[in-house]
Amino acid sequence: MEKLFYPAIFHKAEEGGFWISFPDFPECLTEGDNIEQAYEMAVEALGLALTSRKEEKQKIPTPSWIDKIQIEDGTLVIVEFDMLEYKKKHNAKAVKKTLSIPEWLNEEATAMGVNFSQVLQEALLSKLNINR
Protein backbone atom coordinates (compact mmCIF):
# COMPACT_ATOMS: atom_id res chain seq x y z
CA MET A 1 0.00 0.00 0.00
CA GLU A 2 1.24 3.43 -0.77
CA LYS A 3 2.00 6.13 1.71
CA LEU A 4 -0.62 8.76 2.43
CA PHE A 5 0.01 12.45 3.06
CA TYR A 6 -2.49 14.60 4.95
CA PRO A 7 -2.25 18.21 6.07
CA ALA A 8 -2.25 18.87 9.81
CA ILE A 9 -2.23 22.12 11.70
CA PHE A 10 0.20 22.33 14.60
CA HIS A 11 -0.94 24.87 17.20
CA LYS A 12 1.21 26.09 20.09
CA ALA A 13 -0.46 25.11 23.34
CA GLU A 14 -0.72 27.73 26.10
CA GLU A 15 0.74 25.32 28.65
CA GLY A 16 3.63 24.43 26.31
CA GLY A 17 3.99 21.90 23.55
CA PHE A 18 1.61 21.58 20.63
CA TRP A 19 -1.88 20.39 19.83
CA ILE A 20 -2.67 19.07 16.37
CA SER A 21 -5.81 19.10 14.25
CA PHE A 22 -6.51 17.63 10.81
CA PRO A 23 -8.75 19.54 8.37
CA ASP A 24 -9.81 16.27 6.71
CA PHE A 25 -10.57 14.49 10.00
CA PRO A 26 -12.46 16.80 12.38
CA GLU A 27 -12.60 14.02 14.99
CA CYS A 28 -8.81 13.66 14.97
CA LEU A 29 -6.97 15.73 17.59
CA THR A 30 -3.78 15.01 19.49
CA GLU A 31 -0.95 16.73 21.32
CA GLY A 32 2.75 16.49 22.11
CA ASP A 33 5.19 18.05 24.53
CA ASN A 34 7.63 19.02 21.76
CA ILE A 35 7.63 19.10 17.95
CA GLU A 36 9.06 15.58 17.57
CA GLN A 37 6.55 14.01 19.95
CA ALA A 38 3.73 16.07 18.41
CA TYR A 39 4.59 14.74 14.94
CA GLU A 40 4.75 11.13 16.21
CA MET A 41 1.40 11.57 17.96
CA ALA A 42 -0.03 13.09 14.77
CA VAL A 43 0.98 9.99 12.79
CA GLU A 44 -0.60 7.71 15.42
CA ALA A 45 -3.79 9.78 15.59
CA LEU A 46 -4.06 9.84 11.80
CA GLY A 47 -3.61 6.06 11.74
CA LEU A 48 -6.36 5.59 14.29
CA ALA A 49 -8.70 7.88 12.34
CA LEU A 50 -8.01 6.08 9.05
CA THR A 51 -8.35 2.56 10.45
CA SER A 52 -11.51 3.48 12.38
CA ARG A 53 -13.12 4.86 9.24
CA LYS A 54 -12.03 1.78 7.29
CA GLU A 55 -13.46 -0.60 9.92
CA GLU A 56 -16.74 1.35 9.97
CA LYS A 57 -16.81 1.29 6.14
CA GLN A 58 -16.80 5.08 5.99
CA LYS A 59 -15.26 7.00 3.12
CA ILE A 60 -11.58 7.87 3.47
CA PRO A 61 -11.27 11.55 2.52
CA THR A 62 -8.97 12.74 -0.19
CA PRO A 63 -6.30 15.01 1.30
CA SER A 64 -7.25 18.69 1.19
CA TRP A 65 -5.47 20.97 -1.21
CA ILE A 66 -2.94 22.85 0.85
CA ASP A 67 -3.76 26.21 -0.74
CA LYS A 68 -7.45 25.82 0.21
CA ILE A 69 -6.84 25.40 3.97
CA GLN A 70 -7.61 28.42 6.13
CA ILE A 71 -5.12 28.79 8.99
CA GLU A 72 -5.90 31.35 11.67
CA ASP A 73 -3.23 30.25 14.11
CA GLY A 74 -0.74 27.44 13.85
CA THR A 75 1.56 25.99 11.25
CA LEU A 76 0.60 23.73 8.37
CA VAL A 77 2.53 20.45 8.39
CA ILE A 78 2.16 17.53 6.00
CA VAL A 79 1.95 14.25 7.92
CA GLU A 80 3.18 11.13 6.15
CA PHE A 81 1.32 7.93 6.98
CA ASP A 82 2.27 4.40 5.94
CA MET A 83 -0.70 2.05 6.42
CA LEU A 84 1.44 -1.07 6.08
CA GLU A 85 3.86 0.06 8.80
CA TYR A 86 0.91 1.00 11.03
CA LYS A 87 -0.63 -2.45 10.54
CA LYS A 88 2.68 -4.15 11.31
CA LYS A 89 2.92 -2.17 14.55
CA HIS A 90 -0.69 -2.48 15.70
CA ASN A 91 -2.00 -5.74 14.14
CA ALA A 92 0.77 -8.21 14.89
CA LYS A 93 -1.40 -10.84 16.59
CA ALA A 94 -1.25 -14.32 15.11
CA VAL A 95 -4.17 -15.54 13.00
CA LYS A 96 -4.75 -19.26 12.61
CA LYS A 97 -5.05 -20.49 9.00
CA THR A 98 -5.98 -23.94 7.77
CA LEU A 99 -4.33 -25.14 4.58
CA SER A 100 -3.83 -28.33 2.61
CA ILE A 101 -0.63 -29.76 1.16
CA PRO A 102 0.11 -33.18 -0.34
CA GLU A 103 0.79 -35.86 2.27
CA TRP A 104 4.24 -36.67 0.86
CA LEU A 105 5.26 -33.01 1.14
CA ASN A 106 4.04 -32.87 4.74
CA GLU A 107 6.06 -36.00 5.59
CA GLU A 108 9.25 -34.63 4.01
CA ALA A 109 8.89 -31.22 5.66
CA THR A 110 8.06 -32.72 9.07
CA ALA A 111 11.08 -35.06 8.83
CA MET A 112 13.31 -32.01 8.22
CA GLY A 113 11.77 -30.07 11.14
CA VAL A 114 10.28 -27.35 8.93
CA ASN A 115 8.32 -24.66 10.78
CA PHE A 116 5.20 -24.40 8.59
CA SER A 117 4.10 -21.05 10.03
CA GLN A 118 7.49 -19.48 9.38
CA VAL A 119 7.62 -20.84 5.82
CA LEU A 120 4.12 -19.53 5.06
CA GLN A 121 4.94 -16.09 6.49
CA GLU A 122 8.17 -15.86 4.50
CA ALA A 123 6.41 -17.01 1.32
CA LEU A 124 3.60 -14.47 1.76
CA LEU A 125 6.06 -11.64 2.43
CA SER A 126 7.94 -12.62 -0.72
CA LYS A 127 4.78 -13.01 -2.81
CA LEU A 128 3.45 -9.63 -1.67
CA ASN A 129 6.89 -8.02 -2.08
CA ILE A 130 6.89 -6.78 1.53
CA ASN A 131 10.06 -6.19 3.52
CA ARG A 132 10.01 -6.97 7.22
Image (cartoon, rainbow, N blue to C red):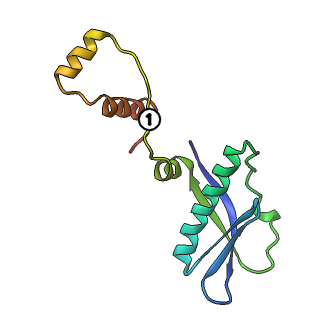
Which of 32/70 is in front? 32
Q: Would you identify the image quadrant in which residue 32 lies?
A: bottom right
Q: Secondary structure at mark 1?
A: loop
Horizontal relation, residue 112 to residue 100: left or right: left
Horizontal relation, residue 100 to residue 3: left or right: left
Counting from the top left corner in percent of width and height, residue 92 is at 45, 47
- How many other residues sit within 10 Å of disc 1, few (<14), some (14-19) or many (≥20)? few
Which of 88/116 is in front? 116
Residue in view at x 44 percent, y 35 percent:
129
Counting from the top left corner in percent of width and height, residue 10 is at 67, 75
- Reply above or below: 17 against 102: below
Quick one: quadrant of the N terminus? Answer: top right
Counting from the top left corner in percent of width and height, residue 107 is at 22, 15
Which of 39/32 is in front? 32
Q: What residue is pinned by disc 1? A: 129
Q: Amino acid at mark 1?
A: Asn
Counting from the top left corner in percent of width and height, residue 83 is at 56, 49
Residue in view at x 50 percent, y 52 percent:
90
Residue in view at x 73 percent, y 54 percent:
63
Q: Would you identify the image quadrant in which residue 111 lies?
A: top left
**How many numbered badges does the structure rendering display?**
1
Quick one: quadrant of the C terminus? Answer: top left
Horizontal relation, residue 48 to residue 115: left or right: right
Residue in view at x 70 percent, y 49 percent:
53
| Residue at the extreme bottom of the image, as rendered | 15
